[in-house]
Image (cartoon, rainbow, N blue to C red):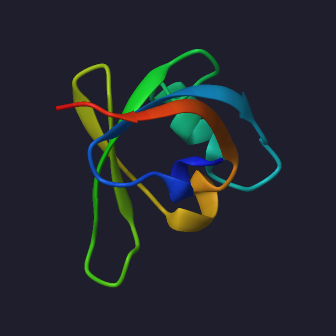
Amino acid sequence: MTLADLKPGQVARIQSVDTRLPGVVRLMVLGLVEGTDVRFRHAAIGGDPLEISVFGASISVRKEQARQFQVIGAVIDG
């Protein structure tokens, strides 16, 4: 499962990151690294970009880049 597969309200932990796609390293600098818990907030109209919450901040991530982040433990967090 990747960040792009999460549904609104789901929380998951980043398990691995594929850094080959341009822009992914920049997202890692913002906190999207292995072991970090993230929450999927919502997607823009049309489904792209996605809004991800990490360390209390919201980050917009293009769906293509979100597919480079493998996650585990996706649960709905009320």
Q: In the image, 51: left or right of 17?
A: left
Q: Is residue 53 above or below residue 62?
A: above
Q: Residue at x 26, y 44 (%)?
A: 9
Q: Residue at x 62, y 66 (%)?
A: 64
Give the camera-side residue of 75 and 17.
75
Residue 5, horizontal then vertical, whole percent: 54, 57
Q: Is residue 21 above or below residue 17?
A: below
Q: In the image, 78: left or right of 42?
A: left
Q: Quadrant of the C terminus?
A: top left
Q: Which residue reaches farthest right?
A: 20
Residue 34, horizontal then vertical, whole percent: 64, 20
Q: Residue at x 75, y 55 (%)?
A: 21
Q: Is residue 49 above or below residue 18?
A: below
> Quadrant of residue 38 in the image?
top left
Q: Which residue reaches farthest bottom?
A: 46
Residue 43, horizontal then vertical, whole percent: 31, 65
In this rendering, the count of numbered labels is 0
Give the camera-side residue of 68 and 7.
7
Q: In the image, 52: left or right of 42?
A: right
Q: Residue at x 31, y 19 (%)?
A: 55
